[in-house]
Image: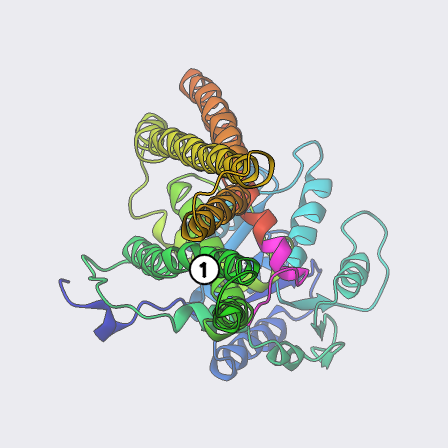
Amino acid sequence: MGSSVAQSGVRLPHVLTVGFAGYGPLPDPAIIRERIGQYLADRRSAASRVVCGVCSLAGDAQPIFAESCIALDIPLRLLLPLPRDRFLQEFSGAEMQRMARILDHAASIEIAGSDESLDDGVYECTLQAVQLSQELLAVWDGSHAAGIANTADILNFASQMRRPVTWIHGQTGAVESLHHPDELDSNPEAELDFLNDLPEEGIVAASDGQSSIAALWLAKLDVNAAQVAPQVRKLAALPIILTALAAFFSATSQGRRSPGLWIAVGGTFGLAASVLPMLVKLGPRQALWVRIRTAAEISRSMGALWATPARYKIVGPEILPELSGMIRSLDLLKSQARQQDKPTLDQFKESYVRDRLLDQMNYFSRQSTQAATTSRKYRLVGKVCTIGAILLSAWVFIGHTLMRINTGLTGKSWLTLVASALFQFATVAGALLIVKDSDRRQRRYMELHRSLAGWESELRAFHTWPPVIEVVSKIERALLVELLEWRSLLQNRKMPRN
């Protein structure tokens, strides 16, 4: 496209996922189809979000819901208990053709249920539809049928999951709200709004399509996180340095001809050390970086799994509910884009190893070396300054106390001053070593590098999708775990949010 994103806007849509439960039989399918279609049309027009549907394909009611989504151009996410070919073998004639048409028009198809029993699998798929949804539409005749595929149990589960439920009576077509869907409007998904409103300067769109939107979204988050992070690192050192200067000037005021001036200077530095973090909003800057960087790394993981034939399962809304809007939105984009360009397993492995795994290994190697260098630098400064301060202090003590050597007041004063300054330099070096956490980061980077190297061997050895996705999932979880710990600190208010 070649135009600036600032003109088009790199924004993810808010998504409203409607799950469906219900089996049948239906005395009048036409009435149920009308009620389902009307409900979906109303939700699409009323909601300020992109509506998508999620369901399985069993009984009389679920195929009607799926066909209604397709007719209204609502993205449909199908959960099947069996792979497509095996699932279609459960039908024959016109019904098989009907199911095939639904499968062909679905945005995504996932094998979600157990294949040990078809009934068990269908029930599990419907439970997962409830879990994945934000609200539930159900067709039910009000009875408690025997068997595992029981809509009453599904509705009870939805109630436990606190899902708003709209019930269409399977016999009469009457509609009742068990929990009104508009309850969802009390959750504005503020975190996605915050991320959508981040600046977009310098981000240029290259092409259209869902994959391009996801790539531009990640670039936008990366740019904003990079702009905040250097400021946080630099500002974090200022209070330490100012506190050391305050201690230095206050301590060396004794014996000075104008002690008031020295005390005043020390007090000024002390006041600056106390006030500066509030003035520059150091805590909020750190919190801002954590918020943006977490969203960026989760988006990066989703991008790394973009071409896999399964939905994103590394971090879900249940782990980071405040990012559920972003995850749902990217998940929907992935389901819509997957059919456009689906690589082979070997192509995916090659690109993942090259663009994700080796890139991260090189990053951890560089960061480990940098952390080790930083640690050595601060330790060297601390040792040199401490030894120098001790030697100077010993010289002043021996020369002016024990040996009574008269070196003059000026020499004595400046030697003491230099010794005090060296002690403060050593203190600052030690404090910065702790703040930068170089030793722990160096060990952590090496651990991750070794783990990734081992997983690379596993990844290259497997030649089917399930074990490859399992290894990739372990890699992505390992890459996210430390950042999620930082996010947890933010959530528990150990770091200020705003």
| Residue 402 visible, this orientation | yes
- At a point 43% along the width and 48% down the height, the residue shown is 408
- At a point 43% along the width and 67% down the height, the residue shown is 195
Q: Among all residues in the image, which is located at the extreme left?
A: 2
Front residue of this view, candidates 319 and 406? 406
Rendering coords of residue 213 (x, y %): 31, 59
Give the residues drawn in magenta, as a range: 487-498
Rendering coords of residue 116 (x, y %): 70, 31
Direction from residue 159 to residue 442 in the image, left or right? left
Quadrant of the image containing the C terminus: bottom right
Question: Eyeballing the image, is 112 above or below 292?
Answer: above
The kind of residue tagged 1 is Leu
Q: Quadrant of residue 176?
A: bottom right
Reading the image, the residue beneath label 1 is 238
Front residue of this view, candidates 344 and 145? 344
Direction from residue 233 to residue 213 in the image, left or right? left
| Residue 314 visible, this orientation | no
Quadrant of the image containing the N terminus: bottom left
Question: Eyeballing the image, is 85 above or below 251?
Answer: above
Front residue of this view, candidates 269 and 123? 269
Rendering coords of residue 198 (x, y %): 37, 70
Question: Eyeballing the image, is 468 above or below 22?
Answer: above
Q: Secondary structure at mark 1?
A: helix
- At a point 45% along the width and 62% down the height, the residue shown is 75
Magenta-span inclusion, residue 495: yes
Magenta-span inclusion, residue 195: no
Direction from residue 163 to residue 11 in the image, left or right? left
